[in-house]
Amino acid sequence: MDKSMTSMEVRMADKLTSVIDIRGDVTAASEPALMAAYEEASRQGARRLVLNFSRLEYMNSGGIGMLVTLLVRANRQHQPLAAYGLSDHYRGIFELTRLDEAIGIYDDERSALAG
Amino acid sequence: MNRVACPAPRRLASFALASVPGSERVALTQVADSVAHLNLPPQRLNKLKTAVAEVTMNAIEHGNDNRADLDVDIEVLYSGTEIVVTVTDHGGGDPGWAGDGDDAEIPDLDRKLSGDQGPRGWGLFLIRHMVDGMKVTVEGERRTVWLTLRTPVPGRPSGGLRHIGG
């Protein structure tokens, strides 16, 4: 039953910003995929990362912990994180956990890239 | 004084799931299906689903210690004014918090980012903010988490519902 249905694709949106398109679930089991995406973005020279949650299906506390791990790694490299595409429910969870204070939250990709 | 009759809770669903990763997704779907006819506001339903998934995951990983031979039992009750979901594990494992979790460490993002706390440990915090009440009962190896979500009374304005707990 353990279908870790997560895919993370990296694309350079501009010279300095990589977007990670997240599809499916964000749980502790997604950590290898997210960290591989992060490393790929860094390898491409990203100075800023944008997480696209518009195809997120499910996120749990393990996924929140994984985002904290990503934040720690990105902070060390002085790479700001932004996100867009969160549903109202998950936006509320970002507020509850204060992740929204550490990750800039935007309505869409255009504003996330402009931010 | 007028007395309001409290109807006996009605069972909306009762099912068992194996303690394997992914069962929490099944739990949240089945609980959502069982309360669909109550037409909860989507935000309330999403909060209930998140709480059910977190409690079920905790029962699998901690209570039953990921032993696939041990079930997690889930029951959904409805009294007319509230939904109660019970999640029971049978392994006697350490749930990661004592009692109802009142004394559990509160996750703090600043401390996590500085390395003072581990990155995980959000489950109980989320559960307590998603529902109106949570309690834990233990009988031997059997541990049950009770989640309560108040529902609008039919025919009355729903008003604001406040969160209880951490």
Image (spheres, rainbow, N blue to C red):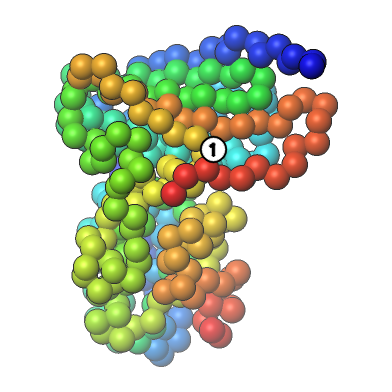
Q: Residue A98 in the image: x percent, y percent?
A: 45, 65
Which corner quadrant of the image does residue A33 belong to?
bottom left
Tag count: 1
Residue at 56 percent across and 72 percent down: it is: A106
Q: Is residue B5 above or below residue A83?
A: above
Q: Residue B43 in the image: x percent, y percent?
A: 62, 45
**Along the line of sight, which residue is nearer the eye, A2 or B94?**
B94
Which chain contains the residue that carries disc 1?
A: B
The quadrant the C terminus of chain A occupies is bottom right
**Along the line of sight, which residue is nearer the eye, A46 or B41?**
B41
Residue at 39 percent across and 49 percent down: it is: B125
Residue marked by disc 1: B132
Residue at 45 percent across and 86 percent down: it is: A14
Residue that sits furthest to the front in the current view: B1
Question: Can residue A19 be seen in this snapshot?
Answer: no
**Along the line of sight, which residue is nearer the eye, B89 or A86?**
B89
- Disc 1 crowd rating (10 Å Cα; few below 14, some 14-19, many 20+) is some
Which corner quadrant of the image does residue B20 belong to?
top left
- Check disc 1 and give the amino acid type: Asp
Secondary structure found at label 1:
loop
Q: Is residue A7 above or below residue B44?
A: below
**Along the line of sight, which residue is nearer the eye, B34 or A9?**
B34
**Relative side of A31 to A85, left or right:** left
Q: Residue A47 in the image: x percent, y percent?
A: 35, 87
Residue at 48 percent across and 58 percent down: it is: A96
Q: Is residue B119 above or below residue A82?
A: above
**Relative side of B140 to B131, left or right:** left
Q: Residue B131 in the image: x percent, y percent?
A: 52, 39
Which corner quadrant of the image does residue B92 belong to?
top left
The quadrant the N terminus of chain A occupies is top left
Question: Can residue B58 be seen in this snapshot?
Answer: yes
